[in-house]
Image (cartoon, rainbow, N blue to C red):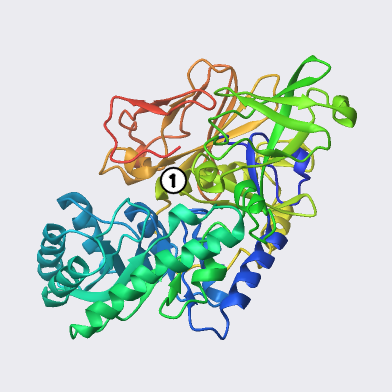
Amino acid sequence: MNPYVPPMGAPQSEIDTPALLINHEKLDRNIQKMAAFFRGGHAKLRPHSKTHKCAQIARKQIAAGAVGITCAKLGEAEALAEGGIGDILIANQIVGPIKIARLMGLARRCRVAVVVDDAANVRALSEAASAAGVTLGCLVEVNVGMNRCGVEPGEPVLALARLVAESAGLTFSGLQAYEGHLQNLMPFEERRARVLVDMQKAVDARRYVEQAGLAVPLISGGGTGTFTVSGRMAGIDEIQAGSYATMDAKYHSVGADFENALTLLVTVISRPRGDLAVVDAGMKAVTPEFGVPTVLVEGATFKGFSEEHGTLALEGAARSLRPGDKIELIPAHGCTTINLHDQFYVMEDERLMDVCAGRHPARRRAGRVARIGADTGHQRGHHRPALSSGERRRLRARRPPAALHLPRRPRAAPRIPDRVVVLHRQSGDGRWAAFRLPTDLFPPGHRADRRRARFSMGDESGILRALRPDRREVGRSSGNRTIQPRGRGAGGRERPAVPRVAGGLGGDVAVSGWRPRALAR
């Protein structure tokens, strides 16, 4: 993760690259448009979060009318529950004692359902739910032609549904049927015809189970490429579309009528010849499985991927591109591209309005470190180690757009500060990098020293400052790359030895002499 984030309100040109941008106005229009489609209809929307992986966007979708959120993985569900989402469907099988134990912990915090297609897995979930004293919803997955997971329609669906209904700790919540093999099928009329045929298999399976005397509460499935068909079918109750919120070039090419709110900001780093440009985004910044991204420069076409480089073919006005120019790409596949990044930069009129962290909870912590750097380092176009009190008040008074920044669940304030921030400014560069170190890194029993330590940033030359969470300075050094806490310990005694933390700009933070329980950069 790049630790540098410009201040809120900075122009797009000040964002370091490659960086994911979200136009919050387009995002909001996409969310409202999809909500309007389902408003008043039989089927309800349960958006899939595997695309954006962001609790703030999920809360916005629920506020617009979604009945809950769909996840692909247990880790995504845990992150969303931490972000305040209370009704989650994990649209995959959760197998194995480690994941099942985590699932039981999640079920204590929110309403959660999972998908099953195996009797042994059902028995394992039942045993764990009974032992944990929780109730877990289960949907039986029906294979409707994707040939990935799921049981075949008919008797196999009935047998597994009965087992779920009879198992302690479990509730039979219905069926799942995903027509993922049809999402991008062209032309649309063929897609429509195939969806009606394949999803009817799930409707027939529901009828078969109900004729045997077991009620089927709902059928959940669908996606951004098929919601206009399956979302109007009798017997389909929930649609799990997800990519519509941010959109990508692939879905747009097959007729999904939503705006491309997601782009990747890149920098031209080389012009080896007149018809060729190279940008700083390759396969580690944008994924190629659905094709090349769309370049938002007339006459420029994305030509090929390397690990860290993308090549553009240039024609006409695009030949005026020069090294240092920043341009935008629309990823062909948003879900897997977003998975490569730690955060979104939320934009309004090409100005930074917010930074939203996604992915796994550990990645969200990394995103907050970037915000620490933004709040303490770079202001008003120049760099300095701290803000004046007036500047801090003005910064706190700013608010990001309501489209993304919804209220978080209140949390109890920690009894003591939970981190020390180390700022590093490299000589000749002028930028400040921020690293957050949790206080439980330091020896227990020395409360006066849990907020202080000696720090080293490897061989990087420059200026270091260590700040407490209230921005009070702990120590400062220039040239020797260390920070020594000021003063002596309680009662005038020398402080005990504390760990040395090492790591250069952009590198991993390492600790010598101690084995910390947690270490976040």
From where the camera sits, is residue 413 visible?
Answer: no
Residue 504, horizontal then vertical, whole percent: 51, 23
Q: Residue at x 76, y 34 (%)?
A: 326
> As displayed, is residue 36 above or below residue 516?
below
> As displayed, is residue 10 above or below residue 353?
above
Q: Residue at x 54, y 36 (%)?
A: 287
In this view, the residue in front, 198 or 67, is 198
Tell me: 383 left or right of 19.
right
> As displayed, is residue 217 above or below residue 198?
below
From where the camera sits, is residue 48 visible?
Answer: yes
Amino acid type indicated by mark 1: Arg
In this view, the residue in front, 354 or 178, is 178
> As displayed, is residue 28 above or below residue 370?
below
Please give the count of numbered marks on the rendered protein: 1
Residue 383, horizontal then vertical, whole percent: 72, 35
Within the image, what quadrant is residue 269 found in?
Answer: top right
In this view, the residue in front, 425 or 160, is 160
Tell me: 363 left or right of 18.
left
Question: Which residue is identified by label 1?
Answer: 419
Q: Residue at x 45, y 44 (%)?
A: 363
Q: Residue at x 52, y 77 (%)?
A: 232
* SS for dot 1: strand
